Image (tube, rainbow, N blue to C red):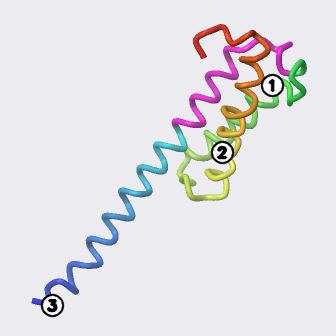
């Protein structure tokens, strides 16, 4: 009985690691994609008004990180982690500043 469980354990572990990697990849792509779409839909003059990078800079950072995540580096690579960090910084800092600049009006 124990010998059968010992043989099946590596199969279970590899499947579990695959599922966790897939969940992290979907999370990374969702954060980066939402950030990228939001950056595209904002006015260019609003970014310097809140004291952050210009619109083109954010779009370039988010697009390159998303592309590298999609090309197979994965969410746990250095590019994936930088992409997650850039997306979260955009969503939690820049998006809030843009929303405050527009008096909190708008869908986003």
The quadrant of the image that shows the C terminus is top right
x 57%, y 28%: residue: 34
Write the start and end of the magenta stretch as one range.
30-47
Q: Nearer the viewer, residue 63 or 58?
A: 58
Of the two numbered discs 2 and 1 on the same chain, state the one appearing first in sequence. 1
Q: Is residue 100 magenta?
A: no
Query: Quick one: 89 or 55, which is closer to the camera?
Result: 89
User: Gap in Å between the C-alphas at discs 1 and 3?
Assistant: 59 Å
Q: Look at the picture and state if 79 lies above or below 59.
A: below
Q: Which residue is mark 1?
A: 56
Q: Residues within 10 Å of mark 3 (few under 14, many from 20)?
A: few
Please state which of the two labelled residues, at mark 3 or mark 2, is closer to the viewer: 3
Residue 30 rendering spot, x and y as whole percentages: 52, 36
Q: Earlier in the sequence, mark 1 or mark 3?
A: 3
Q: Which mark is residue 39?
A: none
On residue 2, the disc is: 3
Disc 2 to disc 1, how far (Cα)? 16 Å
Q: Are marks 2 and 1 in contact (CB under 8 Å)?
A: no
Q: Nearer the viewer, mark 1 or mark 3?
A: 3
Which SS class for mark 2?
A: helix
Alpha carbon distance from label 3 to label 2: 43 Å
């Amino acid at each position: 009985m124990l010998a059968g469980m010992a043989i099946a354990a590596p199969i279970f572990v590899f499947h579990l690691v695959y599922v966790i990697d897939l969940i992290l990849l979907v999370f990374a792509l969702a954060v980066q994609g939402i950030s990228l779409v939001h950056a595209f839909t904002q006015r260019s003059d609003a970014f310097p008004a809140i004291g952050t990078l210009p619109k083109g800079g954010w779009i370039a950072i988010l697009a390159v990180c998303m592309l590298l995540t999609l090309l197979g580096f994965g969410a746990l690579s250095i590019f994936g982690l930088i992409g997650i960090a850039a997306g979260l910084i955009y969503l939690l800092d820049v998006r809030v500043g843009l929303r405050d600049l527009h008096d909190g009006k708008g869908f986003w």
